[in-house]
Image (cartoon, rainbow, N blue to C red):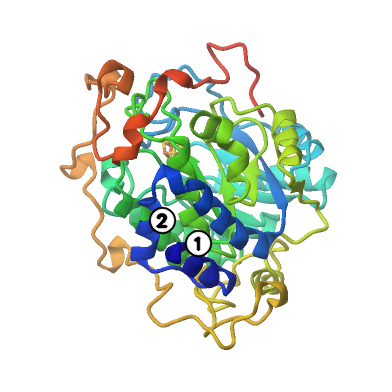
Amino acid sequence: MDLLNTLVDKGLRGESPTREEALAVLATSDDEVLDVVAAAGKVRRAWFGRRVKLNYLVNLKSGLCPEDCSYCSQRLGSTSEILKYTWLKPEQAAAAAGAGVAGGAKRVCLVASGRGPTDRDVDRVSQTIAAIKEQHQDVEICACLGLLSDGQAERLREAGANAYNHNLNTSEATYGDITTTHTYADRVSTVQRAQAAGMSACSGLIAGMGESDEDLVDVVFSLRELDPDSVPVNFLIPIEGTPLAGDWNLTPQRCLRILAMVRFVCPDVEVRLAGGREIHLRTLQPLALHLANSIFLGDYLTTEGQAGKDDLAMIADAGFEVEDTGTTTLPAHRADVGAAAGTGCGGHGGEGGGRGPCGEAAPADTAPAPAEVGTPGATPAGIGAPRPTPAEGGTPRPTPAEGGTPRPTPAEGGTPRPTPAEGGTPGRAPAAAEASRADLVAVRRRGAGTDLPPNA
Ligand code: SF4
């Protein structure tokens, strides 16, 4: 297929496809899905070999969030029977992190529910980072604490956080349908704060929330502009007790097309296969390793993942290998920027540092081949420019207090969307999603109401 040959050539040069080419990847048929995986797999292997980086989630604080993200079991008004607890003590978090490191994780992701941390919370997390690094000197720490205020990113960086995660989740146009208590611009701003403080930025998306192909391409191109070092691709886990509980909009083939599109748009970036892989990709999970070079090991924040030993077996059976701590995840041209910034894991170099946005390559005649990467390309004018915050003239969607209309939860009198099995038809989901087999899958919760221990 000409499209795929073109995208492989571009990906090997570190260039992104056009928006139309990215849409065309999502529009390929199920008959073509192995061709798409094979093509994107060439790009993945060129930049990351057959290595798979393992990441491990530790939920420092669970539930009771005042925000209303529709996909989240910890949201305001959630009736999900999840485990709810306040901050883990540093030694508890360190013990949990140790389990992940023992399983092969080279990054520990410290997550806390809430709009954003207080300065006292930053102190707590700083103590937790110290406790983990005392036992596991080489482990990468990524903090995920919500929206950051002035100075907090710098304090986390000084405390030893290598990276900061804050996902864009969905396109700017649809963001207000998913969350009303904060804005897309707020999220962009926090990612930029983390980058400016010298942390490696991690920012990704959630697919399967009823978005269109155009929305998916929008959010991935927005991520390319933001230039994170890692892009987690989540597939919606439609947890009961949340407004999106009935949204089973994905097929395994569509998940593969989405991952391939992300790989083509961000060829030299850590693409992480994240939440929902088990329930949406199901028996096709191993194919996704040809596209993503990173996964979470074991469970998610409030839902059960595949057992860690099964993750390791899947990686080995598919012919991949777990990335060790001595190996730098990112290609040299990106990792060198992080090294210069002192993040130690290929972080963003803060102001004006390094290569352009992910996939924005040097001119064709000077672009390094993957095997000889190391020459940073220039940042094209207009690409990577920060989106305007509200204070700068951006236009966030109105909050409820401002007249916005959030979708009510069932507990609030809202009507949950019927599942396909109940006769529901996903709103803006593509035609292929209609073949989704919700009857084959189930969300399994961890914590309260279950006999499953928390990952943390
Ligand atoms: S995603 Fe984060 S901010 Fe949104 S409701 Fe969940 S815990 Fe709160």
Q: Residue at x 26, y 53 (%)?
A: 173
* Residue toward you, 278 or 334: 278
Quadrant location, ligand no. 1: top left
Q: Give the structural element (helix, strand or loop) at label 1.
A: helix
Q: Classify the position of the C terminus by image quarter.
A: top right
Does any atom of ligand 1 lie closer than 8 Å to the CB of label 1?
A: no
Q: Residue at x 55, y 58 (%)?
A: 39
Sooner in the amino-acid sequence: mark 1 or mark 2: 2
Query: Which residue bears the numbered disc 1?
Result: 264
| 269 up-or-down from 253: above or below | below
* Amino acid type, label 1: Phe
Query: Does the CB distance between marks 1 and 2 fall below 8 Å?
Result: yes
- The circle drawn on residue 25 is 2
**In the image as oriented, which residue stretches furthest toward the left?**
403
- Assess disc 2: are there few (<14), some (14-19) or many (≥20) residues with their C-alpha within 10 Å of its C-alpha: many
Position in image of residue 99 (x %, y %): 77, 33
